[in-house]
Amino acid sequence: MSNKSFYITTPIYYPSAKLHIGHAYCTTIADAMARFKRLAGYDVFFLTGSDEHGQKIQQAAEKEGITPIEYVDKIVAGFQALWKRLHISNDDFLRTSEPRHHRVVQEFFRRAKAKGDVYKGEYTGLYCTPCESYWTELQLDENGCCPDCHRPVEKVSEEAYFFKLSNYADRLLKHIEENPDFIRPTSRRNEMISFIQRGLDDLCISRTSFDWGIPVPDDEKHVIYVWFDALTNYVTAAGFFDDPEKFRKFWPADVHLVGKEIVRFHSIIWPAILMSLDLPLPKQIYGHGWLIVDGDKMSKSKGNVVDPNLLIDEFGADAIRYFLLREIALGQDGNFSRDALIGRINADLANDLGNLLHRTLNMIGKFQNGVIEDATTKNEIDAALIADAAELVAAYESGMENMEISPVMKRLGAFIGRANKYIDETAPWALAKDAAKKAELATVMYNLAESLRVISVLISPFMPETAPKIWAQLGMTGDIWDVRLDVVKAWGGVPAGQHIGQAEQLFPRIEVEKEEQPAKQEKQKAAPKQEKKAEKAEVNAEGVITIDEFKKTELRVAEVTAAERVPKTDKLMKLTLTLGDETREVVSGIADVYTAEELVGKHVILVANLKPAKLRGIVSHGMVLAASDGERLRLIETDMPAGSVVR
């Protein structure tokens, strides 16, 4: 057993009758991190589960004429089936309806009350049933609705127990300020600091208007309200009561991974409860962004909820996992679209990874009778590939330790492209025609097989179905899940004399039929002459352009991946930008405003179809947008993913 431990959690999901891709996104991130930590030699505990109590559940069950537990049983079964299909490797699935959890919640309540942090009072206020949240008048949105889900709230008045959250404001602020990584990303941290500084109200933690919940000890007409109940699941599963040794090993949790809309509960309410009980706080709360579907936030009311089961049926679990993890920078909102998914499958999985595996195995079969022979020569091209592999492994380890999943996957994709280029550089088909170059051919084939061995291990946290298939096709023995990261730090893990396995196509290219022009576009073509005349008249006004002229400008979101000042200039900065599917260099006059370090990681707006221009000998492919008030100049930034279209 390792002396290194790692405990990661997802939120316990509310039993919604409609599973969506957002559930899959958060859990897949956590699974990738859990698998990486196991690969790195950690003892891992990975928790997910279901938050099953509350008025909303009781009302839904009554509407169907069944008990609350019958209602949640069938929905929870759907979650568990989806996790299995997505190859989620959770070590526990905690349901808040389980007796083991009831014991812990009631003990937390008793201890907080004994300390003087829980008192009985009267609650009168505004309550959102779907969100299970209380709000003040000032917190409501502009329509007087819940600020989270924007649905109507109801005024309620009932006897309730309260937790003295207000007592912990100063301690919470101090902890957040002394531990910069306690809340990530920085934008979420700043939001929470601002929220606390506005003042904390005591928290209502019981209800009497329904009975589907955990009874308050010695006052069973009350049930413990959702956040005091739900958040405690993290210590229940870690063995707070039933396994002290496990609790010492895994608590405090290393990462609570949650959606950005519930960071407040995890980084303010939960730490305050733990402070009340004198228990250690989790090391980190990481708030990931939302999935935007075709440019719009996913919601049932908009009808744009994406069913992950249907996607898995069509594309396979690994393709979905790959897209979600690679396409979306953790902490930012990310766009999901069917076209983008298919494009990524074709470009990265079919063309790059699939092509590398297929070409390599075919050539080993054709030129060497299916046997991987020893590498006995080495030239500059070989040395460069081996050095690139070593750099990849080092960047992979440091990046994953910092939860930089998308950049790590892009770096891994670049190495796959590098290995494909190595085939073209070495031309093994030409070497095979010259008997004098047999040793050189064997070296090339060995290096390709070894590259695939490294790739198979490194993609295993992201693509747990594909990785063992590549491993098997290379003829590797043993279980890939027993492999640790150290084995790919040294080049030469493929045994010479090994026979390759059966070659199979992993990711067939998806052919997409072009759809006919929508009727809306046809109508636009036949626009009335009267409108065209009006449009022409507008153009004649000085400085005014038509919408068609504006549409010629292609604006894209670009991420700054590198920046350096142009030598012998005061203002010019050379930026390396990624648009998701391509990389560009742009020269911008911002060096007197920003340092290179400040620019890396920013998501900016690029005029992508601007004619290239040469500045100080550097070809600039586009222009980044900035705003100025005459004295200050600032880049226009966004939290949308690289490659997004600005419209």
Image (cartoon, rainbow, N blue to C red):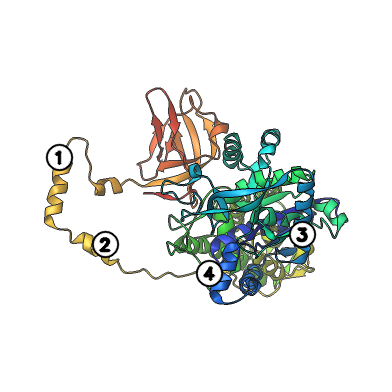
Residue 221 in the image, given as x and y percentages of width and height: 68, 61
Q: Which residue is mark 4?
A: 311
Which three-letter amino acid code belongs to the residue tagged 4?
Leu
For the residues labelled 3 and 4, the Cα–Cα distance comes to 31 Å
Sequence order check: which comes first, mark 3 or mark 4? 3
Residue 16 in the image, given as x and y percentages of width and height: 57, 66
For the residues labelled 4 and 2, the Cα–Cα distance comes to 29 Å
Which three-letter amino acid code belongs to the residue tagged 3?
Ala
Label 1 crowd bin: few (<14), some (14–19), many (20+), radius 10 Å = few
Say which element carries label 1: loop
Say which element carries label 2: helix
Q: Which residue is mark 2?
A: 521
Say which element carries label 4: helix
Q: Are marks 3 and 1 in contact (CB under 8 Å)?
A: no
Q: Which residue is mark 3?
A: 237
Sequence order check: which comes first, mark 4 or mark 2? 4
Sequence order check: which comes first, mark 1 or mark 4? 4
Which three-letter amino acid code belongs to the residue tagged 1?
Asn
Q: Which residue is mark 1?
A: 540
Label 2 crowd bin: few (<14), some (14–19), many (20+), radius 10 Å = few
